[in-house]
Amino acid sequence: MTVTDDCTHRYPETGISVLIVGAGVAGLMAALECWRNGHNVRIVERSPEEVTTGDSFTIGPCATRAFKHWPKLAEENEKIAFVPDIAFYTLSGDRVTNSNHIEYRQDKGSKKVPGHLTRHWRPQLHGMLLKQLYAIGISVEYGCRAMDYFEEGHTGRAGIILENGCRMEADVVIAADGLRSHSTKVTLGQEIRARPTGQALYRTAFPVELAMADPLVRERFPVVGEKEGPIEFWAGEHYHFLVIRTSDIISWTLSHKAYESATESWSHRADPEDVCKITSTIPNWPEVADRLIRLTPKDRLLHFRVMWRDPQPTWVSPAGRIVQIGDAAHTYIPASGNGATQGIEDAVSLATCLRMAGNTEQAPWALRIHNRLRFVRVSCLQRLGLINLKSYSEKPKKDNFTPKGLQYLTAEWIWGHEPEKYAEENYSKVLDHLQRGTPFQDTNIPRGHVYRDWTIDEMLEMQERGEEIELDGEWE
């Protein structure tokens, strides 16, 4: 076992070569964890250079626990994570509730310490992971767009074909290249059908000083302390408006129904004036909110169409040499609040399973075991996204109003999970389950929940009939 200043220990080398396609949060974490677990790592990214844009997201303790193996990473995470407090408002900007920290909920009799919910600015978290990767001698190869995936069962190899025709190969290929990954043609044999939710998001983050140049905006959304991150959640029928600010960055998001001009792309830019055309139709919408919107740099404003996809139980190719993680395996709508967290959980689980396999001959079983360990959990969280999307459009009530979806997302079955330990304890059980059909019971899901397959159409039809989506077991 190797010990370095950058990592508390590295497991003995397994001889398994891993090619990671995609240098987002899931891909970078997969590279770090695969290296820590003894695998040989190469990582490529389609963008010509490091991406430094994006707004904020929640990273749960079930993901950040992995940073304990990386002392410098853990130290940097403490610096960049901020603890938000949240208050709910009407769409006219009137506050309905007091401002409070969001606390994780604890099971009765639990000995785990939950703490407060934290958020990260995406560029800062991404930069932190990238810096750690460089520190252990691994560089991202940019400008490598994977157009096709392939595997050869008889040779035990898999790979990608780049846009320029070049081939890259490894014992295992990890597809971390997000929405519409070409790996799906190998894992499922076809592309996954996506359908509009009927919702789109304008979202942005930019330097706070640009917003503070306007006296009215500065008065309404003042600069705060370094570790603070107040969230204003404005909610009402058909819309919600989210404002987050820290000492250096301000961010806003508007959810709306005029989605025709939006695309499911993280690079589709928009004009702030288009947003103001929508807000002009909202009764009593305050001028100060429009002033904030108009201060947004055009190259920082994204118009994103939110799409549904059914849960996909198969993330692994037939010969077991290609595996999907993150959005390539399981897309989450933004309301789920779990996309980045589950991408990191994937990375930790997969790297651990490959270590448990121990060599390239057993690697296909490691991929299948990882898939089985993870699918039911992520499907449950995808289901919560539907509930959240509806609850976030409820008009806030007085006193201690908290949307139902937010209550679900702070449950211990989510934040208390330890993907590395879970993989170590259940690897041989799932191997027996897959090879011999012995029973296996998931324990990383709500206690008492009996999972059954479901589709988006089924859930939406229930909502249209006015029925609550059934959640058997202890989801809260």
Image (cartoon, rainbow, N blue to C red):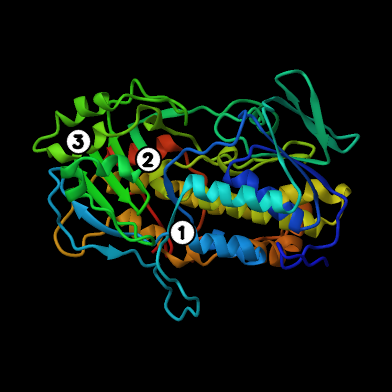
Q: In which quarter of the view is residue 401 placed?
A: bottom left
* Amino acid marked by disc 3: Arg
Q: Please tell me whether mark 1 or mark 2 is closer to you in this view.
A: 2
Q: Residue at x 85, y 36 (%)?
A: 157
Residue 161 in view (yes/no): yes
Task: Determine the CA span between mark 1 and mark 3.
Answer: 28 Å
Nearest the viewer among 261 and 70 is 70
Q: How many marks?
A: 3
Q: Name the residue carrying label 3.
A: 291
Specify which label sits upstream in the sequence, 2 or 3: 2
Label 1 and label 2: CA atoms lie apart by 17 Å
Q: Residues within 10 Å of mark 3 (few under 14, many from 20)?
A: some
User: Which quadrant of the figure contains the C terminus?
Assistant: bottom left
Q: Residue at x 85, y 61 (%)?
A: 12
Q: Is residue 442 visible?
A: no
For the residues labelled 1 and 3, say whether their Cβ atoms are less than 8 Å apart.
no
In the drawing, what numbered circle is on residue 206?
2
Tag 1 near tag 2, CB within 8 Å:
no
Residue 428 place in picture, x, y as percent:
76, 62
Compared across the picture, whether 441 is left or right of 137 comes to: left
Q: Dot 1, how many residues are within 10 Å of its Cα: few (below 14), some (14-19), or many (20+)?
A: many
Q: Which residue is drawn at the image coordinates 20% and 40% (left, top)? A: 214
299 up-or-down from 329: above or below = above
Q: Earlier in the sequence, mark 1 or mark 2?
A: 1
* Amino acid type of the residue tagged 1 in the rendering: Ala
Residue 349 horizontal/vertical position (percent) = 66, 56
Separation (CA) of disc 2 from disc 3: 14 Å
Pointer 1 or 3: first along the chain? 1
Closest to the observer, 131 or 329:
131
Amino acid on which the number 2 mark rests in the picture: Phe
User: Where is mark 1, residue-wise?
Assistant: 81
The location of residue 158, given as percent across then percent down, is 81, 34
